Image (spheres, rainbow, N blue to C red):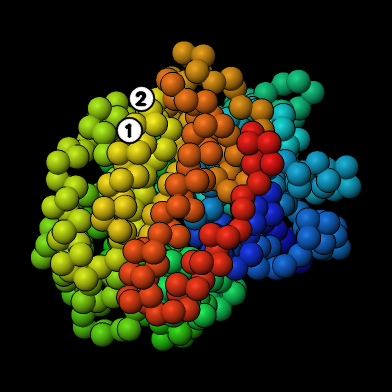
Amino acid sequence: MLKAMFLISLESKPELYGATADKYSAVQPNIYLGLIASYSKKNGVPVEIIDETSNASMQDKINLILKYKPALVGVVCSGANPSSSTMSMVGAIEFFKKFNPVKGNIKTFICGGHPTTLSERTIDETGVDFVIRGEGYDTIVKLYDNVLLNRHPLKMPKIEADKYFEGIVCKLLGRVYMTGMPELKDVNDLPMMDWYNTNPIKYRAHNWHAFEDIENRSPYGVIWTSFGCPYSCSFCCINNLFGKRAYRLRDIKGVLKEIDILVTKYGVKHLKILDELFIINNKRIDEFIEGLEARNYDLNIWAYARMDTVNPELLKRLRKVGVKWIAYGMESVSQNILTNIHKGYNQNFYNDVIKMTKDADMYICADFIAGLWDDTYETLQETYDFAVKNNFEWLNLYPAFAYPGTPLYVKYLNENRIPEPRNWGEYALYGYDCKPLPTKTLTSAQVLKWRDDKFREYHKRPEYLSMIESKFGIKARQHVEEMIKIPLKRKILGD
């Protein structure tokens, strides 16, 4: 492993997930890290992975790296959703603060949506040797080769450096080198995840996803069928990593082949589809459904969908092949708010979509955002009452955050609604430092207190708990009852 490249994900779960960091949170394979590893190996780079399943402390990870002295160490700032890249910076900054003084000649890089968006600030905060702009598959392979040859872009003429380095940002003696974003790859040229080294038995499904079998949340698989999203919601940072609005589709034959491996080789039943937009009525979904119908697997799948991309027939067909959970990003029931965030929804069809989903015998994970600029206690209560009326199987109440790289971030900074963030832990939903956006009439503390109070209130309602018990059994109910007793400590609430 002397000339290897080490790839690391740093979850920092105690800081980012607080009291939920143990059995209540999922443990998910880092797909972006896994794809970088597979692509690099395919192109001749020896790779070792350290993720959260190593159960090693930060210092233990550093000691392991120092023991083997790899040529290159990369921290991958990503997670289960695009927003995870920003809060992953908490662990990255801590890691490099400890690693830089002892790393010697080992070269380092960091990649992900957040570092791509705030490249120079990321260098300043981490002291990393290189920031990778964009997905970085070819960039990382070339960087590894250049490190072995002791090349550095700021130690050679720029015209020569540009031949060897693309998608790189670095600093040396006050000078900055930055190249443009590389062209996006054809996603069907990417190799499959290396599931042998990313064994699904090490991972654990979300608690609500496994309500039907709450004591058996492993093995757990995550797959992707597309990257990016064609929509332009002002709060979403999904396209940060790509440098533009992009929506690239993976061949469904490759998706089904990967599911075959997860099911037949690793015994996966709980399966998450990573795509921010998977369920949409088109031919590739037909191919996906037909492929699973032919296989007749016993699966428990969850996937995201927009509420304007489904119909009754599609939902029923998906349910028959194991798509039991559907996550709808409803955001708000205020039409004014939906319009202002460019969601593109007409709230009037919510009731029809919810009914057709329930008629298909699918479970709903309802995602709402609390604290958008025009939110008041009245609009928030209206949204909460809507959720109570529908008694969704799971309710996610996300406080609003302005993620770097989004139109919302630019707007809030330009209009002095918020100062420039100094602590990326403010973006951690369950973390102590969580600090959501204020609204026109509510402070950040008021928004967060409302969110925490209503999340507990919703999931401890007798009608909710009775529904959970009748659908999933007493153990699922007891799991929820135990979870909602755990208080979240919040700095801005004086805890």
In this view, 489 is above or below 442: below
Placement of 4 over or under 270, stated as above or below: above
- Element type at mark 2: loop
Residue 273: x %, y % from top left = 37, 63
Amino acid type, mark 1: Thr
Question: Which residue is located at x 88 percent, y 42 percent?
Answer: 101
Q: In the rendering, at what x and y percent does residue 125 appear?
A: 72, 32
Q: Is residue 464 left or right of residue 360?
A: right
Quarter residue 13 falls in: bottom right
The one nearer the camera, 93 or 360, is 360
Q: Residue furthest left?
A: 313
Kind of residue indicated by mark 2: Asp
Residue highlighted by disc 1? 379
The residue sitting at 70% across, 58% down in the picture is 6
Rendered view: 330 above or below 249: above
Question: According to the image, label 2 marks what residue?
Answer: 374
